[in-house]
Amino acid sequence: MPPIENWNRLLGGRVAVVTGGGDGIGGAIARLFAEHGALVEAAEIDPERAERLRAEVTAAGGTVRAHVVDVRAEQDVARLADAVLAEHGRVDVLVNNVGDYRPLARFPQSSAESWRQMYEINLLHVFAVTRAFIPSMMERGRGSIVNVHSVEGMRGYPGDPVYGAMKAGVAHFTTGLAVTMGRHGIRVNGIGPDLTQTPQVDYLTGYEDHDDLWGSWAPVGRVGWPEDQARVALFLASDLSSFVTGHNVPVDGGTKAGAGWFYSPREGRFVNRPKHL
């Protein structure tokens, strides 16, 4: 078991690639990894977000390079891998974080084109980016991969079953890859967020006067923040989790554990057929 030499620098000197690293969950992961001494290589499709991340991490004393990359494009993934490996000769941590839940249409009105777009933004790039970096990990006999998907990949999602299927694909890829790569010293785990406030998904606007209902919506009684996800990613990326692989961790305030049950303040108990919350 590797010793923890510095609890304040859990990733000291490690090269960490974070896709979708400019903002939201990916941005929080990139910043926290840099705080813990990682040499962060962030992939971000938006140039302004990429530059903002670079400036903020650098000002805080961290090390980051921000690459403007569309991970859906094979040539961009190759360019990212070439740049990282040319600079460092290795990658120690990979966080696949890119994704989007917003369907072009509900399933009865959807098309093959909408399914393809969901596939490219939520699943295909996970394969592509992982394949680009995993040979470096195999050569060195160590590495940690963290795939950020969604709690909707671990339960039925009425909003868009195609999205849920793609996230379930990431979760299963995580488990299968962990079994395949364990003998090479590579750990693979996943994170399934829910109810997390980000620029992409706003859970608070319009609900400012409903703080009393959070106890019904999530067992922990509050909204989640990108930093909640980042702390779990840090655990999974670091040697703190050296005996953990093949797991998909819901970071959801308990929503998956309580799925199907709602706390009714009026009735003072959990109900599975709420009439009045």
Image (cartoon, rainbow, N blue to C red):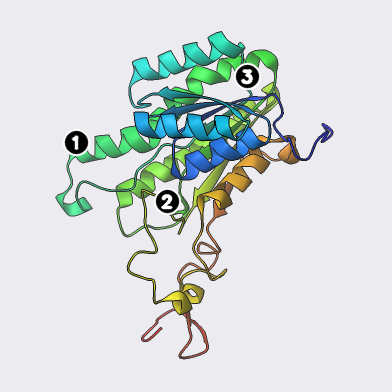
Dot 3 alpha-carbon crowd within 10 angstroms: few under 14, some 14 to 19, many 20 or more:
many
Residue farthest to the bottom?
267
Read off the residue under disc 3: 137
Query: Label 2 near label 3: C-beta < 8 Å?
Result: no
In this rendering, would 137 be left or right of 216?
right
Q: Earlier in the sequence, mark 1 or mark 2?
A: 1
Read off the residue under disc 2: 198
Q: Earlier in the sequence, mark 3 or mark 2?
A: 3
Q: Amino acid at mark 1?
A: Glu
Looking at the rendered structure, the number of numbered marks drawn on it comes to 3
Q: Amino acid at mark 3?
A: Met
Please, is residue 20 above or below residue 272 in the view? above
Identify the image quadrant of residue 245: top right
Q: Nearer the viewer, mark 1 or mark 2?
A: 2
- Can residue 243 be seen here? The reply is no
The one of 264 and 184 positioned closer to us in this rendering: 264
Q: Secondary structure at mark 3?
A: helix
Q: Nearer the viewer, mark 1 or mark 3?
A: 3
Distance (Cα) linking label 1 and label 3: 35 Å
Identify the image quadrant of residue 179: top right
Please, is residue 84 above or below residue 43 in the view? above
| Residue in the picture at 42% in, 29% down | 51
In this rendering, would 118 be left or right of 126?
left
